[in-house]
Amino acid sequence: MNQTTADEVLAQILDSGVVTAAQVGALQKCVDADWVVDKQEAETLLRANHALGENDEDCPEWGDFFIASITKLLVRDMETPGEIDPQEGDWLGNALELHGVNNSSQQRLLREIKETTSKIEGKAKDFID
């Protein structure tokens, strides 16, 4: 798995609907290499989480990685740290409309966003109460 790219790992998860700790470790190495999670990668993570459905609970490492990656993009960004601006909120809301699954990992993500942001704008407000 050391030579596997993030896209290959995510394709495996999407195809199987199952994730392992080794796959999460490989994804984490990719993120650690450049510290950047862009919207395309985040949308792929949301698609993978959707494919996992309730299987997300079979790999606790997945939920932690998924939440950290999405919040890194939206909450810990340089433009609006600690806030979700209208564009970010619309992006997240649209992505959740397409790839939302309401599993444990997604619920934890929404709680994390609510607890760590001072302002949430855009469509994301529809998902975060």
Image (spheres, grey):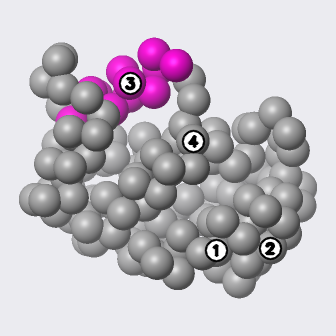
Task: State which quadrant residue 129 falls in.
Answer: bottom right
Residue kind at label 4, given as amino acid type: Asp
In the rendered image of this protein, does residue 60 appear above or below residue 106? above
Dot 4 or dot 3: first in sequence order is 3
Range drawn in magenta: 23-34
The secondary structure that dominates the magenta segment is: helix
Distance (Cα) linking label 4 and label 1: 16 Å
Q: Residue at x 84, y 66 (%)?
A: 86
In this rendering, is residue 25 above or below 116? above
Residue lying at 25% horizontally and 64% vertically, measured from the top left: 52
Q: Which residue is mark 2?
A: 122
Question: Dot 4, crowdedness within 10 Å: few (<14), some or many (≥20)?
Answer: few
Per the image, the residue denoted by label 1 is: 93
Q: How many marks?
A: 4
Q: Position of residue 19 (x, y in %)?
A: 19, 49
Neighbor class of circle 2 (other Cα within 10 Å; few <14, some 14-19, many 20+) is some
